[in-house]
Image (cartoon, rainbow, N blue to C red):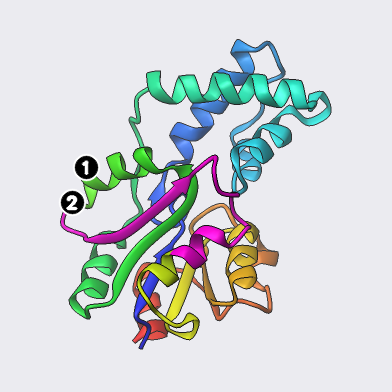
Amino acid sequence: MKKICIFDFDGTLYNTMPDVAKRLDQTLKQEKFPQLTYTEYEQAVGGDINQIMDKILKNNSTPENIKKLRNTYEKLTKTIPDEASKPYPGIQELLEKIQEKNIKIAINSNRHTENIQNYTKKHLKDINFTDIKGYNPKTPSKPDPTDLLNIIEKHKIKKEDAIYIGDTQTDIKTAKNAGIDCVIVTWGQGTSNDYKNKYIIKAIDKPSQLLELIL
């Protein structure tokens, strides 16, 4: 049985894509760059904020433009309300069952920590997240394993007793770089290639399927 489950946030625990796409679209519009389709925004997420800005800028991507878009996007994150973001169906029930088994639950994401905490306090207030590590300018973002390894070390848990659950190639790389098991969910922004990746234990289609892999 695993002793800790560490989750990615966007596309794994929460469906934030509608709100993310809306902000990305407004960011491009405000800075007078070509706007994209919802599908293109879906394909752009998964890495850190700079990687996302690079992808949506396409041929207009330069360090200066990435910085400009990033600043605008972060401002819009504070001004455009989260109207659609919520946990995926079955997530709360899954976390409750994991918690009942005394398995620790943590989050490692490239989203700002405070933002994640606001979401979890609103929708998952009965879940005890023992650690939440989001974007921190002092540490490298995923797929660098620094924060993931820090979570494991903080809990004094062996790598073989930990598992990372995500939805994209970035999450697979993060788990692989940390040397821990990985499960990929198919309800996020991953691709068919991600679901066939040889490193992962399994790609799951519904939250309840995780239980048989960790107990």
Pick whichever, 107 or 96, lies toward us. 107
At label 1, which amino acid type do we have? Lys
Quadrant of the image for the C terminus? bottom left
The residue wearing badge 2 is 125
Q: Is residue 86 visible?
A: yes
Instruction: State the residue at coordinates (79%, 27%).
Output: 61
At label 2, which amino acid type do we have? Lys
Q: Is residue 195 visible?
A: no
Residue 178 in the figure: left or right of residue 1? right
Instruction: State the residue at coordinates (50%, 58%).
Output: 147
Which element carries disc 1, helix, strand or loop?
helix
The residue wearing badge 1 is 122
In the rendered view, tell whether residue 113 sits above or below residue 146. above
In the rendered view, tell whether residue 124 sits above or below residue 50. below
Asked whether the beta carbons under mark 1 and mark 2 sit within 8 Å of each other, the answer is yes
Instruction: State the residue at coordinates (48%, 40%).
Output: 17
Span of residues in magenta: 125-150
In the rendered image, residue 49, in percent from the top left (x then y), is placed at: 60, 37
In the rendered image, residue 6, in percent from the top left (x then y), is placed at: 41, 66
